[in-house]
Structure formats: C-alpha cells, structure tokens
Amino acid sequence: MSINELFSATFNSLRRARSAAATGRKAERALLAHHHEEVAAEWPAVSEWTRKQVRAYFKRQLQLDEYVGALRRAKVDGARLVALHHANALYTTLGVTKIGHKKKLMVALRGLLQAQADAS
C-alpha cells in the first residue's frame, strides 16, 4: 500500500468515525430532551425535591451512583441542588472531577430546569 493509499484510508476511516460520533451525539441529545420532558412531567419541580429524590435522580436517571454518598453528606435537596447548579459549585461540592460527568450533569440539570420552566 502506498503512502497516499494509507493516508486516504486513514482519512476516510476518521471521517466515518467523526460522522458516527456526530450521529451518536444527536441521538444522545434527542434522548436527553425526551428524558427532561418525562422527568419534568412526572416529578415535582426540582426545587421541591427531597434529599431522597435528588439521590434517586442521580442514581436512576443519570446513572451517577458514585455521587450519592456526597449528596447525602452535603444534605443536598432540590433547592440546594438548584442553588449549587446556578452558583457553579455543584462539582466541587460533590467532588466531580471527570469531564464527562461534569458535562452530563450540566446538560441534564440545564435541560431539566428548562423543561420544567416551559411546562409551567
């Protein structure tokens, strides 16, 4: 295989991977939008959540079980969750260091709060 053929094959492979990743991100955003609407319709307003509901949301909806202990120790209820989110202090309070988890939390909470605002 010549260098040009190798370059072309690598470039095409990267282009396909990038396209698949973009499609995956679109699907993830659509799923999150549906998730926000579902939670907004079935749950009380985030600011009214109990500590137990906040932990359940992190565990069941976001699948971020590793922060449940930190939520319990910090006594985070819905009102505190919203306040920490708006103050950009949620990550430090919970000890979130993974970029993917930070992004997931930011997108989920922003979307959920927006969906609940739109529903009211």
Image (cartoon, rainbow, N blue to C red):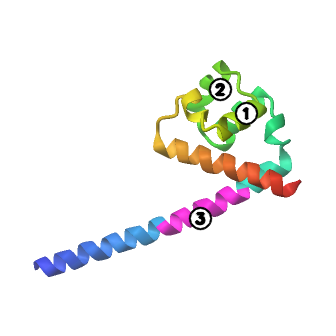
Q: Residue furthest front?
A: 87
Asked if residue 64 lies left or right of residue 17, the reply is: right
The residue type indicated by label 3 comes to Ala
> Are dots 2 and 1 in contact, CB under 8 Å?
yes
Q: Look at the picture and state if 40 lies above or below 20.
A: above
Label 3 belongs to which residue? 27
Q: Quadrant of the N terminus?
A: bottom left
Asked if the stretch drawn in magenta spans residue 27, the answer is: yes
Observer-side mark, 3 or 1, equals 1
The residue type indicated by label 1 comes to Val
Q: Residue at x 65, y 26 (%)?
A: 71
The quarter of the picture where residue 7 lies is bottom left
Asked if residue 27 lies left or right of residue 81, the reply is: left
- The circle on residue 71 is 2
The quarter of the picture where residue 19 lies is bottom left
Q: Residue at x 46, y 65 (%)?
A: 21
Q: Overall secondary structure of the magenta stretch?
A: helix
Return the disc, 2 or 3, that comes first in the chain's sequence: 3
Asked if residue 49 lies left or right of residue 55, the reply is: right
The residue type indicated by label 2 comes to Leu
Label 1: how many residues lie within 10 Å, few (<14), some (14-19) or many (20+)? many
In what element is the residue under mark 1? helix
Q: Which residues are magenta?
A: 22-34
Label 1 belongs to which residue? 54
> Are dots 2 and 3 in contact, CB under 8 Å?
no
How far across and how far down the image is residue 56, in percent? Answer: 72, 34
Q: Residue at x 75, y 54 (%)?
A: 114
